[in-house]
Structure formats: structure tokens, C-alpha cells
Image (cartoon, helix red, strand yellow):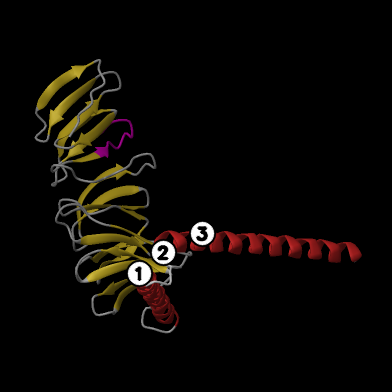
């Protein structure tokens, strides 16, 4: 007990000495500046200098006080809005712009997100995540935590209820969906427009149209090709890999690569090479 009291007394003495040294240093600096400027001079010059320095110091301190006061007021107002204002329920959410009419709010702490229109009305609740479409398409893919569906990014209203095990973004007016292991393509009303009995594979990414074509796997599950928007083979499934790069396609048969245009015209024929197309 006595040892604890001794430590506290020693710490207090150290802090006291530190404070005395700090105030002494500040006082010395101030005295030095005052002497240099002639503020200790009792003449008319000294009085004028003191008034100028005092006025400048007062202005600086006033500006500083105003800045601090404004920051405190803004923080208090923000706290009030978060706690009691109309934004109280969404302060824990990050915003993601969709359009002038709708915004997606994503929960930061595991909370489900929601979509809100410009009038402050929630148009869709219970959103786990979203994926925006490509180009001029307007339907946003979203998940309710179990199934996937689509809502309109301009109204925030659900267009296709979440009923798919997996679903991909809209591109060129079509979107790929998966149920029971098979990939189908639907239009913006949810109608199946392409059904070629294409199997879903976890390692197969995309199912998105680029330049009017989409990479899909043949039902043999061994090779990939390109289909057009009517579901017809535009490039026969004779390849092990096809990658879109800007307005080109890089295709590989496992040993050789070729480069094709968006219209599937050959730019560089199959060769034992590793092509890199820079947009």
C-alpha cells in the first residue's frame, strides 16, 4: 500500500515538473517575441505594437473559436439525425447510387439492405446484395438471402420475384438464370427465351453477353462456344476457353490461341502463342 502511494507521489511530482518546464518554456518564448517586437517599450511605439498584436491575436482566436463551434454544432446535428431524425434508421448503411430515382442502402453490420426512392419510400426491403446490369439494361439482379430476382433501377420496384437459385446480370436485354443445374436465358419479363439444356458449372463464370454473343458450355461439359441472342451457335463449341477483351475474342483450343473480332472474323489465326489484347 505504501509502495503504491510512493509511486503515485513520484508520478505527480514528475507531471508537476513537466508542467512547470512547459509553461516556463512558453513564457520564455513569449517574452522573447515581446522584447524583439518592442512590446515592452512604454513609448507610443510600444503601445501601438501591443494593440496590433493583441488585435491580431483576438481575431485569430475568434476565428478558431468559430471553427471549433461550427464543427461541434455539425457533429451535434449529425448525432441528432442519426439518433432521432429521419436518417436515424440508415446511418449504419452505406449508399450505392442506382439512378436519380432510387438508391441502394447496404448494411454495414450484417443487416439486410433496402432500396429507397427519391421520396424516401422503401420500395424493396430484405436485400442481401445487388449487381447492376451492363449497358442500357435497367434491371438490377439482387438476392433476398436465399433466391435471386430483379428490380428496376429507375423505380426501385421488383420486376421479377426472387425465385432462381442463381442469376446473372442483364446484358443485351437478356439474363442467365439457373434452376436445378441448368442454365436458361430470360428476357426482362422473366420469360425463358433460350433453353439449350446448358449445364451449370461452378467454375464457369459470366454467362454475360459481350458484343452480341455469350460464352456457354456444350452439354458434353468439355468445350465452350459462343451463342447469339437467339440461342444459336455463332461459334461452335470447339474450344477450351474463350475470353472477351474489348471488341475482340481470344479463343483457345487447349494448345493454340487465336484472336477474333466482335463479328467473329479471324484477326490472328490459331497458333502456339499467348495473345494479349490491350483495349
Query: Residue sitting at 22 percent across and 65 percent down?
Result: 153
> Mark 1 falls on what kind of element?
helix
Query: Residue sitting at 40 percent across and 62 percent down?
Result: 37
Question: Label 2, on which residue?
Answer: 38
Is label 2 in contact with label 3 (beta carbons under 8 Å)?
no
Instruction: Decide whether residue 218 is among the magenta residues.
Output: yes
Overall secondary structure of the magenta section: loop
Q: Find residue 147 and report its image quarter.
A: bottom left
> Mark 3 falls on what kind of element?
helix
Kindly report the distance in space between the C-alpha atoms of the residues bearing marks 2 and 1: 8 Å
Q: Which residues are magenta?
A: 216-224
Instruction: Count the labels in the image.
Output: 3
Q: Is residue 126 above or below residue 198?
A: below
Q: Nearer the viewer, mark 1 or mark 3?
A: 1
Q: Is residue 218 above or below residue 14?
A: above
Residue 29: give its label. Answer: 3
Amino acid at each position: 500500500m505504501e509502495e503504491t502511494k510512493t509511486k503515485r507521489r513520484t508520478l505527480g511530482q514528475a507531471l508537476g515538473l513537466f508542467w512547470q518546464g512547459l509553461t516556463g518554456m512558453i513564457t520564455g518564448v513569449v517574452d522573447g517575441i515581446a522584447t524583439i517586437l518592442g512590446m515592452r517599450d512604454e513609448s507610443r511605439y510600444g503601445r501601438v505594437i501591443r494593440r496590433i498584436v493583441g488585435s491580431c491575436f483576438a481575431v485569430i482566436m475568434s476565428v478558431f473559436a468559430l471553427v471549433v463551434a461550427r464543427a461541434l454544432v455539425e457533429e451535434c446535428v449529425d448525432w441528432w439525425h442519426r439518433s432521432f431524425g429521419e436518417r436515424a434508421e440508415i446511418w449504419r448503411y452505406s449508399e450505392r447510387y442506382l439512378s436519380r430515382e432510387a438508391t441502394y442502402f447496404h448494411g454495414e453490420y450484417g443487416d439486410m439492405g433496402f432500396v429507397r426512392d427519391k421520396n424516401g419510400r422503401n420500395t424493396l426491403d430484405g436485400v442481401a446484395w445487388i449487381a447492376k446490369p451492363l449497358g442500357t439494361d435497367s434491371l438490377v439482379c439482387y438476392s433476398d438471402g436465399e433466391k435471386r430476382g430483379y428490380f428496376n433501377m429507375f423505380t426501385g420496384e421488383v420486376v421479377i420475384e426472387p425465385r432462381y437459385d442463381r442469376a446473372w446480370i442483364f446484358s443485351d436485354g437478356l439474363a442467365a438464370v439457373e434452376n436445378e443445374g441448368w442454365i436458361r436465358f430470360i428476357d426482362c419479363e422473366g420469360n425463358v427465351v433460350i433453353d439449350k439444356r446448358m449445364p451449370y458449372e461452378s467454375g464457369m463464370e459470366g454467362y454475360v453477353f459481350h458484343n452480341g454473343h455469350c460464352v456457354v458450355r456444350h452439354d458434353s461439359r468439355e468445350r465452350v462456344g459462343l451463342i447469339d441472342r437467339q440461342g444459336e451457335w455463332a461459334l461452335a463449341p470447339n474450344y477450351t476457353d474463350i475470353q472477351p477483351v474489348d471488341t475482340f475474342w481470344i479463343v483457345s483450343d487447349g494448345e493454340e490461341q487465336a484472336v477474333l473480332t466482335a463479328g467473329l472474323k479471324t484477326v490472328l489465326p490459331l497458333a502456339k502463342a499467348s495473345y494479349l489484347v490491350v483495349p
